[in-house]
């Protein structure tokens, strides 16, 4: 069994980079996101998305990542489905309690 910690919170930032693709009208987007590892600790990475279809991979904010199941992709590789549930910010009263 692995001793590695599995983090489940993702933070999407408003920072977007786009690049033109090789085909006309094709636009590749990269959004800065981060794996939240604790208070003030975030490991950042760039998440690819199709900028011609969506303005962001995810709207900016925090998300709880939930696994939805397993499937094989068209190349026969195991993939894990996932969904992103927005985390509602805590109110000051809830934090103080």
Image (cartoon, helix red, strand yellow):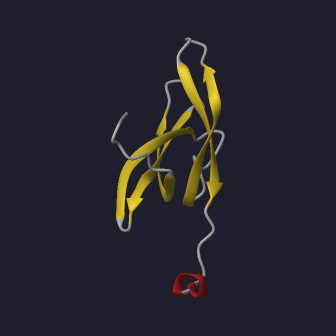
Residue 55 or residue 57, whichever sits in front: 57
Residue 62 or residue 67, whichever sits in front: 67
Give the x, y percent position of residue 9: 50, 55
Point 62% across, 27% down: residue: 70
Residue 16 or residue 32, whichever sits in front: 32
Give the x, y percent position of residue 49: 55, 39
Point 37% across, 58% down: residue: 42
Q: Is residue 33 above or below residue 79?
A: below
Image quarter where the N terminus lies is: top left
Q: Position of 8 compared to 90: left or right?
A: left
Point 57% across, 56% down: residue: 63
Q: How many marks?
A: 0
Q: Is residue 93 above or below residue 64?
A: below
Give the x, y percent position of residue 88: 63, 68
Question: Looking at the image, which residue sits at the far front?
Answer: 1
Image quarter where the C terminus lies is: bottom right
Q: Is residue 12 above or below residue 27?
A: below
Point 59% across, 82% down: residue: 94
Give the x, y percent position of residue 56: 58, 49
Q: Is residue 37 above or below residue 92?
A: above
Q: Quadrant of residue 52 in the image? A: top right
Question: Looking at the image, which residue sits at the far top?
Answer: 75
């Amino acid at each position: 069994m692995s001793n590695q910690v599995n983090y489940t919170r993702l933070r999407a930032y408003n920072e977007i980079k786009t690049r033109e693709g090789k085909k006309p009208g094709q636009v590749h987007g990269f959004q800065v996101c981060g794996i939240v590892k604790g208070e003030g600790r975030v490991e950042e990475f760039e998440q690819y998305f199709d900028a011609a279809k969506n303005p962001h991979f995810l709207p900016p904010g925090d998300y709880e990542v939930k696994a939805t199941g397993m499937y094989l992709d068209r190349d026969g590789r195991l993939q894990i489905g996932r969904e992103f549930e927005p985390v509602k910010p805590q109110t000051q009263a809830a934090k103080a309690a």
